């Protein structure tokens, strides 16, 4: 219990640090992350977006939560032992009036494609949501496959 509280405080500190060092107002922070490097980055991105009610957020191959991602892996039987929940879907579902872009490859063998679909289903209707998918992209090449679409969709997001 103490470890979980400490982890939560560390995460809040990281979010506050990102907000403080940004030269822009907190609400205009455009959050951009890639989950393939670090599962916590996806979670921190969602937590930060939720805390400042970010106007724009982009997630590549996001997962619902870490236990859900573990269930879908080859070691799925270990999901009850995952210590950190990292509730990405929960944080994103609390956003209001944001432009949310999710990108996911249908051939992703790390985070299954349905995770993005479930996240989209949970989003508030006040958000402008774009789902960029590629029938050929895997986990690590999604950005290369959808880059032209991403640029177009970013242009369609309102500027504060």
Image (cartoon, helix red, strand yellow):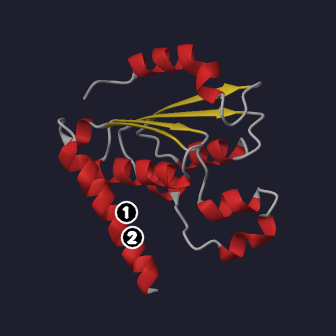
Residue 114 higher or lower than 80, as above or below: above
Indicate the position of residue 53 as horizontal and vertical percent values: 31, 46
Asked which secondary structure carries label 1, the reply is helix
Residue where numbered disc 2 is placed? 8
Q: Which mark is residue 11?
A: 1
The image quarter in which residue 81 lies: bottom right
Q: Nearer the viewer, residue 9 or 120?
A: 9
Apparent side of residue 126 relative to residue 28 in the rendered image (left or right): right
Q: Residue at x 80, y 70 (%)?
A: 77
Indicate the position of residue 107 as horizontal and vertical percent values: 78, 34
Q: Residue at x 45, y 78 (%)?
A: 4
Indicate the position of residue 57 as horizontal and vertical percent values: 42, 37
Apparent side of residue 69 relative to residue 135 in the rendered image (left or right): left
The image quarter in which residue 155 lies: top left
Indicate the position of residue 41 as horizontal and vertical percent values: 47, 49
Confirm or deny contact between disc 2 and disc 1 (CB under 8 A): yes
Q: Pointer 2: residues within 10 angstroms few (<14), some, or many (20+)? A: few
């Amino acid at each position: 219990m103490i470890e979980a509280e400490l982890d939560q405080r560390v995460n809040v500190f990281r979010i506050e640090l990102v907000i403080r060092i940004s030269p822009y107002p907190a609400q205009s922070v455009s959050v951009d992350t890639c989950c393939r490097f670090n599962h916590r980055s996806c979670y921190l991105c969602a937590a930060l977006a939720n805390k400042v009610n970010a106007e724009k957020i982009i997630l590549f191959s996001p997962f619902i939560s870490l236990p859900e991602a573990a269930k879908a892996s080859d070691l799925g039987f270990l999901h009850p032992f995952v210590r950190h929940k990292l509730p990405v879907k929960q944080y994103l579902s609390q956003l209001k009036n944001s432009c949310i872009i999710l990108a996911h490859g249908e051939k992703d063998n790390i985070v299954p494609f349905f995770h993005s679909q479930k996240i989209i289903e949970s989003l508030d209707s006040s958000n402008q949501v774009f789902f960029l998918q590629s029938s050929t992209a895997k986990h690590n090449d999604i950005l290369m496959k959808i880059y032209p679409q991403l640029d177009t969709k970013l242009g369609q997001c309102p500027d504060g």
